[in-house]
Image (cartoon, grey):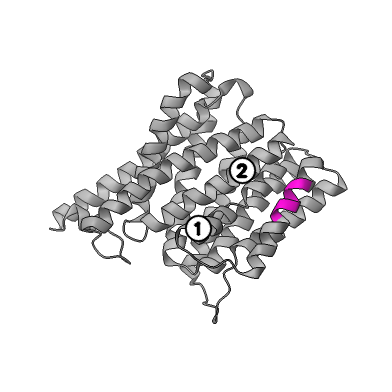
Amino acid sequence: MIAALLALVGALVYGAADFLGGLAARRVRPVAVTAVSALSGLLLLALAYPVLGGAWSSEDALWGALSGVTGAAAIGLLYACLAIGPMSILSPVTAVVSAIAPMLWGILIGGERLTRIGYAGLALALIAVVLVAFLPGEAIARPSARGLVMAVGSGLSIGAFLILIDQTSQASGVVPLLLNRGVNVLITGTIVVIAVVAARRGGVRAGAALGSARGGAGRGMMAGRAWTIALACGLVDATANVLLLLALRSDGDLAVVAALTALYPAGTVLLAAIVLGERIARIQWVGLTLALAAGALLAIG
């Protein structure tokens, strides 16, 4: 029950982070957004470490570091997907793939077993993911092959992140997440530095090199706001990571936690409605309702 609740709340928080990341990626390159958010998330986890604690071991550190590699790929690809769209197709593709991979791992490799109610909850959660993330409109935009590849790649990377974090021990606390963020910062930071150096050699300013191709150079007030949003994104995302970790450590099955975490588009949709005034379609309300029902079934199944 507690694990399902933590995973569901974590999904909403992940959705909020994705909303912020998508906004920032409209004015700043996705890799730059990922680097900044990873850094702010690392600082938050470092401040939280004395409170949350955790024992250091080479095995847990390795799992955490490996999850940092998959995490960097997952977030970078996800923000790129949200930036180029169409979100109505790429978002559910990413979410469903991110759920199916660890679900299969938990059931086939991890030997996890659920009741019939639990399996019904998993199926209901996948349906809810698609309905919540679907944005109906007058015309259906077809995604590019590049967008679909990035969406699937992001989903697989998110799934790998969940699997790797699930391998860590109870005693490790937030240590794996610290390693995750540290490696994430190292990878994305290196890419950003290389991009800036290459731009300067080509006579291009650093701001122009990091500005989104969609949004131009990313200068002035809008660019400054984008960097602030990216910082906030990292804080929110790190909070979601902690909730995910607590869900897995609260005797939560990987398959269940993965299915509920994949409901993160619900957080994005709700925040877009509250902040941007976007309309929530009837089909999305149905998805949100099914998401709550799936959470209840998984909690008791």
Q: Amino acid at mark 2?
A: Val
**Residue, disc 2:** 9
The quarter of the picture where residue 212 lies is bottom left
Residue shown at the point (78%, 51%) measured from the top left:
121
* Picture mark count: 2
Residue shown at the point (47%, 42%) measured from the top left:
236
The circle on residue 274 is 1
Residue 24: x and y in percent read 37, 55
Q: Main secondary structure of the magenta part?
A: helix
Residue nearest the observer in this picture, 274 or 36 = 274
Q: Is residue 158 rendered to the left or right of residue 131?
A: left
Above or below residue 54? Residue 287 is below
Residue 100: x and y in percent read 67, 52
What secondary structure is found at the residue carrying circle 2? helix
The range drawn in magenta is 291-296
Residue 126: x and y in percent read 70, 57
